[in-house]
Amino acid sequence: MATPLVAGNWKMNPPTVAEAVALAQALREPLSAAEGVERVVCPPFVALTAVADALAGSPIALGAQNVHPEPKGAFTGEVAGAMLQGVCSHVIVGHSERRHGFGETDGFVSAKVLAVLGLGMTPVLCVGETLEERDAGEASAVVERQTAAGVAGVASDDLGRVVLAYEPVWAIGTGRAATPETAQEMLGGIRAHLGRLTDSATAAQVRLLYGGSVNAANAAELAALPDVDGALVGGASLDPDAFVAIAKAFAGRA
Ligand code: 13P
């Protein structure tokens, strides 16, 4: 079984670089001690190098929250993958806040996945349906479309390097996590779909994360699910005690 992975998406928090460093310092010791799980924190771009310094020599990896697929050029406000190389090992791609708040399309997300893989980093590809799509009975079709588009063009030898996070939009920041039944049904469905796109052995290598209101109280029941290989955590990743508890819940899974 693949090593589980727990990633903290700090989003546009905390408000200053100094506070980001303080959060990293608070996490450093207890999160390092939570062995048996890959641990990643994803601070805002401007805090990446300062947090990298604060975590240097620890087993905690660093991720970016976004990337532009082009290697360089006239893209005001954007950050290229090569700028992240050497600082980050992981890059979140296609988060629903980018798909829905900034109009990112499946095709744009796919280009980002390929750019991240091409630079030797790990894409954390996010998929997830809105409440309207779920209510319309379209949840599986939506995540299957996002999954297929997100890995389009990825060589099957590289697919095992992709991490896929199922984050239902209605569960993000709402305190209303998916039930274990729904999380397993959706992630099991995504794994089966990856198997149809490639083969089941390749699909088994892809780490599948659940995200959306994961907290210290619900992490253990999520970690017990067969197709949940980790968590992508928003709000609770800003609380060192909660994030460490979530990491430990998944460490126990392996
Ligand atoms: P919350 O854990 O705050 O619901 O956020 C989930 C998320 O969007 C992680 O990427």
Image: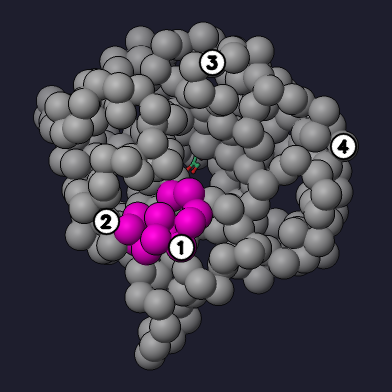
Q: What segment carries the magenta color?
A: 112-123
Q: Earlier in the sequence, mark 2 or mark 3?
A: 2
Q: Earlier in the sequence, mark 1 or mark 3?
A: 1
For label 2, being within 8 Å of ligand 1 is answered: no
* Dot label at residue 2: none
* Dot label at residue 110: 2
- Which residue is at 56% across, 31% downward? 5
Mark 4–mark 1 distance (CA, rounded to whole Å) = 30 Å
Q: To which residue does mark 4 refer?
A: 29
Q: Secondary structure at mark 1?
A: loop
Relative to residue 49, is residue 210 drawn left or right?
Answer: left
Mark 4–mark 3 distance (CA, rounded to whole Å) = 23 Å
Mark 2–mark 1 distance (CA, rounded to whole Å) = 15 Å
Q: Earlier in the sequence, mark 4 or mark 3?
A: 4
* Dot label at residue 119: 1
Which amino acid does the dot numbered 1 rest on? Leu
- Which residue is at 20% across, 49% downward? 152
Q: To which residue does mark 3 refer?
A: 223
- Image coordinates for residue 172, horizontal then vertical, percent: 45, 38
Depth check: 58 or 108 in front?
A: 58
